[in-house]
Amino acid sequence: MNYKTLLKQQLTKLQYLGWAHYCSVCHNHLRSFLPFGDPPRQNALCPVCHSLERHRLDQIFFEKYTNLFDKSPKKMLHIAPEQSFELRLKQIENLDYISADLMSPRAMLKVDITDIPFPDNTFDIVYCSHVLEHVPDDKRAISEFHRVCKPQGWAVLQVPITTDKTFEDPSITSPEERKRVFGQEDHVRCCGPDYIDRIQAAGFKTNRLRATDVVKPTDCQYLGFQENRLVFYCEKAA
């Protein structure tokens, strides 16, 4: 991080300093989060580290329910690395961290997740957040995650939950129609809580947890995420 970026971050901390909210990613107390999205969601974006609701919930889940931070040697594959997470993950002791994406210049490797160029049973951890809704053959991508995950390894595979039941239509190809039907120009489906079925079909034992399974309901607003937000925690059998 260069001097100008660090200075800007420190000034932002002072500008938004307060006690109404707490960012679990950058560990700053804030008077507010910022709106983000189309249409804008209130209290979505951390002004300091730019984390969103899903990042803050995932961070707490990682800390409370996984071995990510226990300092034992592990290898992690992070798909579409988020700015708010990447630097912090790279600093974890004894974590062999690899980021990958098909288009992001920030990723360490260019990778098509439907054809991951690693041998079977390579990674202890796979993290992929809000990518699968962009991938036409998401079932193959999930199968690839299962293949490269080690026995007794785990993955967190997140998708935006925007409907009661997962829906897709391959005939919808124009950006305008995709935005109208799926909510975003480059989405190819709407995902519901039943998305767990696709993950389990690939071989993962999967738990679907609500935010209120991770933190107290009264803490959700303070931490900046909705009570009904989900975490899909996936384990590969021994």
Image: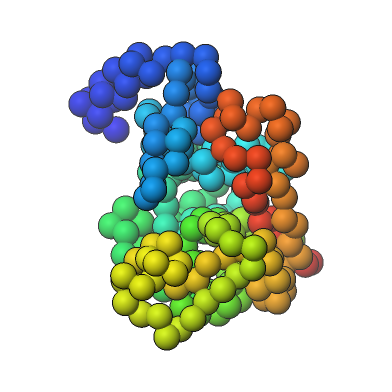
Q: Give the residue displayed 76% in from the left and 65% down from the top.
A: 205
Residue farthest to the right, as pictured: 238
Q: Give the residue displayed 44% in from the left and 29% down from the top.
A: 33
Whole-percent x, y for residue 78 in the image: 49, 56
Tell how many labels. Answer: 0
Which quadrant is the N terminus positioned in? top left
Residue 144 visible, this orientation = no
214 left or right of 50 in image: right
**Toward which corner of the image does residue 121 lie, by quadrant?**
bottom right
Whole-percent x, y for residue 186 in the image: 36, 67
Whole-percent x, y for residue 209 in the image: 72, 50
**Toward which corner of the image does residue 220 lie, by quadrant?**
top right
Between residue 182 and residue 96, name the one nearer to us.
182
Q: Give the residue displayed 53% in from the left and 45% down from the top.
A: 54
Please say if 5 is above or below 179: above
Between residue 27 and residue 190, name the one nearer to us.
190
Residue farthest to the front, as pictured: 180
Q: Give the residue displayed 68% in from the left and 67% down from the top.
A: 194
**Toward which corner of the image does residue 12 lie, by quadrant?**
top left
Residue farthest to the bottom, as pictured: 171
Residue 193 visible, this orientation = yes
Please say if 66 is above or below 119: above
Which quadrant is the C terminus positioned in? bottom right
